[in-house]
Image (cartoon, helix red, strand yellow):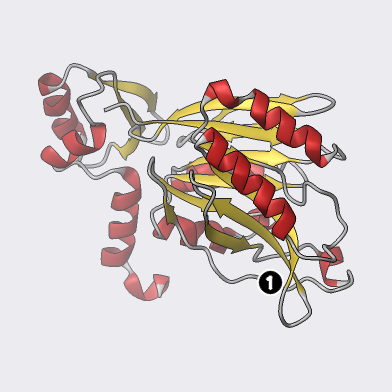
Amino acid sequence: MYRPVRILSLGFRNIPEEQIWDTLRREASYMPDVIVLPEAWLGDDYPMDGCGGVLQRAAEIAAALNTYLICPLYRRTDAGTCRNSAFLLDRQGKLIHTYDKIFPYWTEFSASPPCESGQDTRVIAADFGRIAVTICFDVNFPAVWEKIDGNGAELVLWPSDYSAGRALQAHAMTHHYYIVSATRYPDTAVYDISGDEMSYHTHAGVVAAKTILDLDRTAFHENFNLDKCEKLLAKYPDITVEKRFPREQWFILASHNDRISVKKAAQEFEMEDIRTYIHRSGREINPRFLA
């Protein structure tokens, strides 16, 4: 069953706030399921009067476009420090999650007020799938991405200052979830569940990249799956092997019928997706090493 999510990711630097809201309004006809703005998109200055005004505008846009929206901002804490945060608003404009950058960059600790590290890598159940957020320098710490994988993310949204490139590709390849970036470089990129870079956009001004991802597409290892896959394909001809990776012994199944789901068909034939297979193998083969 084709399970599409429509993503609008923006890349830009030093663009006035009102111009960004206007850009989003102009993209209303695209009907995005989620919009991603870059890290600290209003600039490097820390907020003096909180984030309420900007978040109110973001909430109005989310509600008007009936979309989830990732709005990254610096915010003061009650302790007098600062967090580099990404606020997730739902389709009604309600704040449903705040992700705090777990690994701020070095200069953020010497700013005034100093930035402090977040701790939460929670995965959020949106109405289209399970999503997670990380920010910029977090890309360099595999433990962040491993925890997101363990929490079952299907899609990771990565607002950032810079592009990261192969580092993001490595996480998508290792954990088999989609990754979408929105940066101040400015550029945007999308990485497939195979790790392949699906798209990359950059130019002067505002990059407004539109992507449709199918969250029903699933990656499998050949181990213990080939005979089962033959039977699945025979019963469901609308499911096809979309990609094969002979050296890795992976393959990706995709459905071309809105009423037939790869994930449900795989359960019927007791096929383990690659993430489940690797997690189970680790637990059963050498749990002490992974503890």
Q: Quadrant location of the C terminus?
A: bottom left
Q: Amino acid at mark 1?
A: Ser
Any part of residue 272 in sight: yes
In-image side of 203 versus 24 (left or right)? right
Residue 175 is left or right of residue 285, and the answer is right
Question: Which residue was labeled with disc 1?
Answer: 117
Residue 272 versus residue 28: which sits nearer the camera? 28
> Which residue: 38% across, 44% down?
127
Q: Quadrant of residue 237?
A: top left
The residue under the point 62% across, 39% down is: 61
Counting every numbered tag in the picture gives 1
Q: Where residue 182 sits: x, y (%)?
A: 68, 39
Q: Is residue 277 above or below residue 239?
A: below
Say if 198 sits above or below 280 in the image. above
Q: Position of residue 155 (x, y in %)?
A: 47, 44
Q: Closer to the camera, 274 or 32?
A: 32
Quadrant showing the N terminus: top left
- To which quarter of the image does residue 25 belong? top right
Q: Secondary structure at mark 1?
A: loop
Identify which residue is drawn at 46% across, 35% down.
194
Neighbours of disc 1 within 10 Å: few (<14), some (14-19), many (20+): some
The picture quadrant where one finds residue 273 is top left
